[in-house]
Image: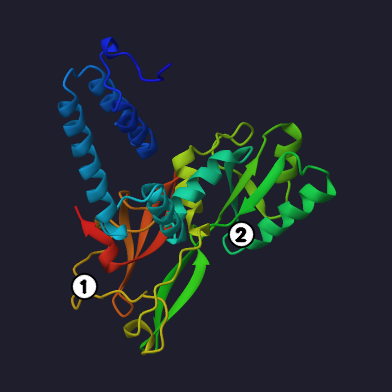
Amino acid sequence: MSDAKPEEAGVPADLDALLEAIDEAADPEADAVVDDALNIDDFDEAAAVLEVLEDDEAEAADQPVADQPVEGEDVAAELAADADASDEEVVVDPYDAFRAELRSLPGKWYVIHSYAGFEKRVKSNIESRKTSMGMEDFVFQVEVPMEDVVEIKNGQRKLVTRVRIPGYVLVRMFLNEDSWSVVRHTPGVTGFVGNSHNPTPLRFEEAFNMLKSLVEVAEVPTAKASGGKGGKAVARSIPAEVDFEIGETITIKEGSFAGLPGSISEIKPESGKLTVLVSLFERETPVELSFDQVTKL
C-alpha cells in the first residue's frame, strides 16, 4: 500500500518537505506560514510564500554581527549606567542632614543664663553634675553656640572662634523637678530664660538656628584669602566710608540672625564692624557684625 497522502486532503504530497524546512528554520513566523500554506489551494503559491521567508532569513544571516541585536544588550547597558551613577559622589546638604538629626533627638532645648565669659565652664559643670547625680537619662546635651569671625589686628586678618551669644547656654533635656534642679543649681547658672520654674523650650527653628554653627562644612581653598597657600575664604570687603550712627536701627541681612532688626551700640571703623543690640529671649543681646552684614531700614 502506498504511503502517499490522498489528494482529497487538500495538501500536496511535496508540501511535507516544505513544512519540514519551516520547522527546522525555527523562525517565530513559522507557525503563521504553516497556517497560510495549509490554507493555500495552489502549491505554487505556497512555495512562493516559503521562498520569501527563506530570502529574509538569508538576509539576516548576512547582516554583520555588530548590527544584529544581542540578547540582553539593553539590560547590560542599564546595569553599566547604574554602576557609573553609583560611583558618582552624592552631594548632601550638611544643614539638611543636621536638621533631620536634630529632629530625631530626645528631649527639648532650653536656654539658661550664665555670667558672660563663664559659658564653657557652665557647660562643663552641668555635664559633671548630670553624671555624678545619675541624670544622664534626663539631661542629654549641653552646647555653647560658637561662631567664626574675622578680626583685624595690626592690619592682619585673623579667623577666631568666639561665643556667639555671650551669657547663654543651651541644654537638651526632659524637664522635670529633678532635672530642673540639677541644671538650675549648677555653679555659674543664674536661671532659665523665661519662666524660671516652668521654662518654655525653644521652637525647632530657633534651636536649629542657634545650633547650626555645630555643622562642619567643607572648606573651599582660596589663594587670595590666604596669601597663595590655600585656606578659608573668609575675607569680607569693608566699605571705605562709615555710613552708620550710634542708636540707628538696622536689619541683619546675613548670618545666623538674618532678618532680625537691631540697634547699633558701637561702631568700629578700623575693623569694619558694628556692635548691634538684638532682642533675644526678651533680653537685648550684643552681636558683632560686619558692615556688609546689615542694611539700613
Closer to the N terminus: mark 2 or mark 1? 2
- State whether residue 124 is above or below residue 282: below
Q: Are marks 2 and 1 in contact (CB under 8 Å)?
A: no
Asked if residue 28 can be seen in this view, the reply is no
> For the point 42% across and 70% down, which residue is it?
149
| Relative image position of residue 52 (x, y in whole percent) | 18, 38
Asked which quadrant contains residue 158, the reply is bottom left
> For the point 27% across and 18% down, which residue is it?
11
The Cα atoms of the two marked residues, 2 and 1, are separated by 33 Å
- State whether residue 7 is above or below residue 130: above
- Using residue 67 as the reference point, say whether residue 88 is left or right of it: right
Asked if residue 102 can be seen in this view, the reply is yes
| Relative image position of residue 253 (x, y in whole percent) | 28, 56
| Relative image position of residue 120 (x, y in whole percent) | 64, 62
Marking on residue 183: none
- State whether residue 218 is above or below residue 282: below
The colour scheme applied to this rendered structure is rainbow
Q: Which residue is mark 1?
A: 242
What residue type is disc 1 on?
Val
**Circle 1: element type:** loop
Q: Which residue is mark 2?
A: 119
Count neighbours of disc 2 (C-alpha within 10 A) and say few if under 14, some if 14 to 19, many if 20 or more.
many
What residue type is disc 2 on?
Glu
- State whether residue 296 is above or below residue 177: below
| Relative image position of residue 35 (x, y in whole percent) | 28, 20
**Circle 2: element type:** helix
